[in-house]
Image (tube, rainbow, N blue to C red):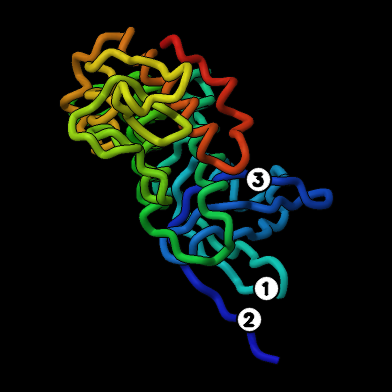
């Protein structure tokens, strides 16, 4: 019997789970192979060759050996280490937790390529850890951009321009999380929130990744959008995000 086949990929570490006395199962979102779970042998020993490279939020270059049930980590190199810096700030840490949980939900099938979701997650963690080209942004802002964009790529894009129910152009009387976008006065369900028009414009910038347009957004608009995004995400994901209620939306 010859050696087991290997493959190499780039990945963002989502979660880790203890296995036995010294091993861990590493759940990761890879660039070319979708979601992968693999065993890192001996990683919990102080002498481990992996060190902290496979901590959540890190982006790595990884070589894996194909296994019968779980693949096995052979080699790993750090591309971006975000675990340690993000853990020092509660808002950054909880935002990153929501991001990796969202990615875990949106890519449910293992080894089914999801390159767009990989790029969105890697980019969001980079923005969270390093800021935008023209400066840092609040954790809430980076998270909401990621949530809107990742759900959009998964088929849940909110309509922020025309009434989501009747299609009336430019009708933005309210925003209905359950219907999935803005609604006109005639179509709005009972209890529909009526956000400030600037909040909807800001959400559009988050959805398109236009960080320049978010530079001078008032904190009250950021908070109002955060509530709408949370409601939208909770409604359209099959299971709620356990980590989302932990997020401090006041920053």
* Label 1 with label 2: CB-CB less than 8 Å: yes
State the image coordinates of residue 63 (x, y, percent, origin top left).
52, 65
Q: Nearer the viewer, mark 3 or mark 2?
A: 3
Structural distance between the alpha carbons of marks 1 and 2: 8 Å
Which residue is at 47% across, 58% downward?
A: 30
State the image coordinates of residue 28 (x, y, percent, origin top left).
55, 52
Residue at the disc numbered 2: 4
Residue at the disc numbered 3: 16
Q: Nearer the viewer, mark 1 or mark 2?
A: 1
Q: Residues within 10 Å of mark 1 (few under 14, many from 20)?
A: few
Q: Nearer the viewer, residue 118 or 11?
A: 118
Which residue is at 35% across, 37% downward?
A: 165
Q: Nearer the viewer, residue 5 or 200?
A: 200
Q: Earlier in the sequence, mark 1 or mark 2?
A: 2
Q: Is residue 73 above or below residue 1?
A: above
- Figure quadrant of residue 209: top left
Residue at the disc numbered 1: 67
Report the side of 79 relative to 169 (left or right). Answer: right
Badge 1 marks a residue whose secondary structure is loop
Report the side of 166 relative to 216 (left or right). Answer: right
Q: Residues within 10 Å of mark 3 (few under 14, many from 20)?
A: some
Q: Earlier in the sequence, mark 3 or mark 2?
A: 2
Q: Is residue 88 above or below residue 236?
A: above
Badge 3 marks a residue whose secondary structure is strand
Which residue is at 34% across, 21% downward?
A: 174
């Amino acid at each position: 019997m010859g050696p087991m086949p290997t493959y190499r990929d780039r990945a963002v570490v989502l979660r880790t789970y203890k296995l036995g006395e010294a091993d861990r199962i590493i759940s990761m979102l890879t660039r070319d192979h979708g979601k992968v779970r693999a065993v890192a042998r001996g990683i919990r020993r102080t002498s481990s060759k992996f060190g902290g490279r496979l901590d959540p939020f890190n982006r790595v270059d990884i070589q894996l050996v194909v296994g019968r049930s779980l693949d096995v980590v052979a080699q790993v190199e750090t591309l971006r280490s975000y675990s340690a810096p993000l853990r020092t700030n509660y808002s950054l840490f909880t935002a990153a937790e929501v991001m990796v949980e969202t990615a875990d939900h949106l890519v449910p099938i293992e080894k089914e390529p999801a390159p767009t979701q990989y790029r969105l997650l890697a980019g969001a963690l980079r923005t969270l850890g390093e800021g935008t080209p023209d400066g840092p942004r609040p954790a809430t802002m980076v998270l909401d951009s990621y949530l809107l964009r990742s759900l959009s790529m998964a088929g849940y894009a909110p309509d922020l321009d025309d009434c989501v129910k009747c299609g009336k152009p430019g009708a933005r009387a309210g925003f209905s999380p359950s219907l999935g976008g803005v609604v006109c006065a005639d179509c709005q369900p009972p209890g529909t929130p009526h956000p400030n028009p600037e909040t909807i414009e800001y959400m559009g910038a988050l959805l398109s990744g236009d960080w320049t347009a978010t530079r001078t957004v008032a904190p009250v608009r950021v908070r109002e959008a955060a509530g709408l995004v949370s409601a939208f995400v909770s409604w359209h994901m099959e299971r709620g995000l356990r980590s989302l209620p932990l997020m401090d939306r006041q920053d």
